[in-house]
Amino acid sequence: MGAGRLAGRSLPAFDVDCWGRAGGLSVPTDSSSLMTENNRPVTVGNDLVVDVRLWGKYDGLSRAYPVICHLLDTAAVAGVLWDDVLSSRTRRRIARELGVPEAEGRRIVAFWAGLHDIGKITAPFQAKVPEAFAAVAAEPQFAAGAAHAVSERSLRHETATHWALVEFLTECGYPQDRLVRMSAGHQVAQLLGGHHGCFGSVLREKELRAVAAWQPGLGEDGWREQRHAHAAAVRRLTGAMRVPQGALSGPTAAVLTGLVVVADWLVSQVDVIEPRLPAADWRGSGPELDEHFRGALAMPPSLVRGAGLGRAQFPQRSFEEQFPFPPNKLQADIAARLPGLVSGAGLLLVTAPTGDGKTEAALHAASVMARVSGASGMYFALPTMATADAMFDRVRRFADGNVEGERALTLLHSMAWLSPAYADGQGQDLGQGSVVSSDGPTGTEAGRWLRTPRRGLLAPLSNGTIDQALTAVLPVRYNVLRLLGLSDKVLVVDEAHAYGPWMHSLLVRLLEWLGALGAPVVLLSATLTGRAASSLVEAYRRGAGFPEPARVEPCYPGWLYADAHTGEVSEPRAVDSDRERDLRVETRQVRWDVRERPDATPRPGSRRAALRELIAPVTGQGGCVLVCCTTVEEAQRTYRDLQHAFPELAARQGGLRLLHSRYPAHVRQRISAESESAFGKPADEAQAAAVRPGSVLVATQIVEQSLDLDFDLVVSDLAPLAQLLQRAGRGKRHERANRPSWTGDPREPRLVVLEPLGEDGTVAAPKTWGAVYDDALLRRTSVLLNKRAGAGIAVPGDVQELVDAVYADDFSDHLADAAERDKLAHLDAARLAATAAEGQLARMVTIPAPQDVRGDLSVLSSSDPGITEELLTTRLGADTGRAVCVYIQPAGFRTLDPDGAVELPDSFGRAPARRQVAEVMSHTVPLPGRWLAGRTEEHDVPKSWRSSPILADLALLPMSRGEDGRWTCRLGTREIEISDVGISAN
């Protein structure tokens, strides 16, 4: 050890002299009640021996693993995470808040990580393995505490860690404060007590004066001595003799909790522990502990790399070096001027029309901001799974050519590994890695983070859905892991306009935390109101410590930059667009007859009649049309109606397609790929010059974001203005020389909006739409579009004005008709009330702003009564779950396909193999939560699936084939059918 190196790894923080240090703790002379219990300071040093009969890990192992071994393993890997995962700026921030040099900060963090399971040295925990407990329970020093093994079995070991460590850390000299929550020792104890994802409440002084009386399960005598002996051994070996100068900030404490959790889980994997089980005659003497810690330090670096962790590096390169094409005006302006503004962390806001190259501008900007700020990764967040899938290849190509260091890219959403772009070695291991040795719920949760798409948030490079990031500011278990994952990344938020009041409020709170953490942010939007843009920029500035509002007036198209170090907001840069166009908008007010039978003759003035008229030219002259519907049901019915109306079109391969979210995953994947091939960007000049055969795509709003589709005509049901502009961006998107003459000027995209009429003859959303869109926004959009009839919309020139106008407070004042003003005022009142309610709900359930944590970490995982984690996550996920259709064949066996070729995997108690998991998940389909509320035992997955983090939460839909040939099942009060149009409810 004299050389200070082991197994090729330098040991900068664990100095050679720490191996032989006696480590005696100086017992404070202050007699404060926070220091010792019953005035009994514990002598800790070489004379107090660690009892290795006290176990820390057992589940899945050939024999029990001593708790001291697990503590030392965790401490060692925490040091590796400090070195290999945390960025230099995060390490500096932690050391600065601790008031020590970085090397000492590393020692302290490793020491803390090594204390996380001290609470396992209690009778209630040790009694979980009766044979191990029996070996110590009868001995005099343990006997009194052992009597509480049953009566106090509700005492969780992480709670015991919180309660037990305050005394020890105070004896170590950790500073106290008149407020317990601001005392460094208590904060560390609370931090480590949160390593299972939830923090306990701040302890009261009277509780700290008599810990064992309030928590008898902790035990005294031998139990207390052993906790101190184990903690002292960890301190000696990590060399963490310095103490922090005060309490940490909330953001830093959250990041460190996340690091402790990851270190714990990495070394809790059965495959990691099994080779390190000590020999039967191992006694845990000083030299033996030294040797075990050496082995922990020598654990292969692949333990961290295998979890997808590490740091990415962004070398300095020009835009032209990063991309195989010259920059457009927006990209060139950002590339030229942004480097002069970036001095550290900050927020870049880019507003520009669809197709103006915001993605490449963001990737270039992110590399500049990461390099200057010291960020070590990037997360590209999008609104939906489909948009995340579509973005993956573009981000991967950029990373392959422009990122160094650890650059494996992770696609992050619940179905990420089914994406074709993700299948060539980049995918998740589908839950087939090493099992985590822990109790059931914790082991399953650890598995989800280490062996499913969730781990991508910890990886240096990832792209996925925005909800993965927003959950960081909800009081759910392990939100600290999300904060850890985002703290050292550049967060790019695409389609920042695409979120309602609830998600906007969450994004505001997330930006506050990212500002406090010094994490750079890039916001992209095609249709963001000035008010919304200002709220996002101000949130980031508040988190960075600048509560006074600044003047934020974004340009369109253009960009601005807010500096996290100075709080200054740059002068907005207006940039001309390379793609100026005149959008022709037509509105047709129609009777809503979607639910009429396809063979019924459409009445004049109805939606079905309008669609027939608009699509008719396709059959004779060619061209491509997008029909965008509001709900899945209406898309399915529209598709059926057009099948009947245009049988020749429907009979031709690719003539009529349907795309929505309620298909089995492999079917939706196939349709999406076919649609991108048929309607995407031309591959070459020859393809751009070819006349496309007549084709119609009926779809829901999943096509309006991040998908590069190009149609000759876009027909859409009425939607809020921002969404309509997004859909219009799919019209005549690329240069094509031979568009059919019936589509008009090839430089003028055409959007036809079908406005539903209510019973009173005015525009009103059908009841079947439910709460998809706000009625007031629909009415405001209708008024604006009809005012523009015949004049067109200049893109981008008119866009910002229109987007701001549709939300204007005085909108109704400009209406001439009094009845119309009154009706809109009524709708506006309902909209404002709903917006206020959504915002209030978000404020009620989100974690506090970073400056409001004030030493008490429990506020990060506590919520009001009745606000459950399930409620929060389903609200964020738009209340959906996943199901899989299981076809009951005539012979009684169950399959994943109607033809009976793919048998349902159920390996008689054995967890499904990787191939089987992939097969099952490729047949899953998302369903509304209200449908799944009707599930019963017959919808439960096979028992062998329940140990799989991916399969455990699925619902089975047992499909039977009726005499009419339809495959159906019951789900609560609904009859569910699977057919060529996907899942539908009758």
Image: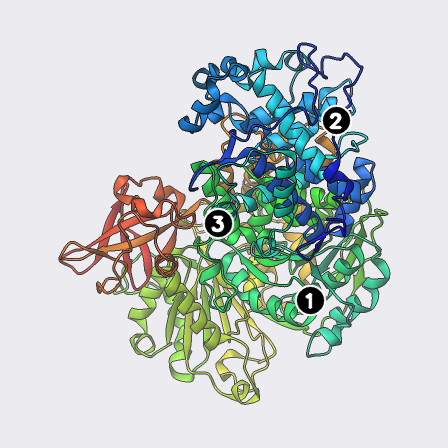
- Residue bearing mark 1: 403
Q: Residue at x 33, y 53 (%)?
A: 884
The label number, if any, that marks residue 346 in the structure image? none
Query: Relative to the observer, which residue lies in front, 510 or 290?
Result: 290
For the residues marked 1 and 3, what is the alpha-carbon distance in whole angstroms?
Answer: 32 Å
Front residue of this view, candidates 39 and 159: 39
- The amino acid type found where label 2 is placed reads Gly
Question: Residue 114: x, y in percent?
Answer: 64, 36
Do residues under tags 2 and 1 come within 8 Å of each other at their CB atoms?
no
Q: Quadrant of residue 202?
A: top right
Q: Label 1 is placed on what type of residue?
A: Val
138 is higher (above) or lower (below) than 703: above
Do the numbered discs 2 and 3 sit on residues whose CB atoms are within 8 Å?
no
For the image, the number of numbered tags is: 3
Q: Which residue is mark 2?
A: 24
The secondary element bearing badge 2 is classed as loop
Q: Is residue 779 left or right of residue 418?
A: right
* Residue at numbered disc 3: 271
Q: CA distance from mark 2 to mark 1?
A: 47 Å
* Labels 2, 3: front one: 2
Q: Element at badge 3?
A: helix
Neighbour tally class for label 1: few under 14, some 14-19, many 20 plus, Cα within 10 Å:
many
Location of residue 403 by image quarter: bottom right
Secondary structure under the numbered disc 1 in the rendered image: loop
Q: Nearer the viewer, residue 928 or 759?
A: 928
Q: How is the image coloured?
A: rainbow
Q: Earlier in the sequence, mark 1 or mark 3?
A: 3
Q: 68 above or below 963?
A: above
Q: CA distance from mark 2 to mark 3?
A: 35 Å
In-front residue for pair 116/962: 116
Comes first in the chain, label 2 or label 3: 2
Above-or-below relation of 901 to 186: below
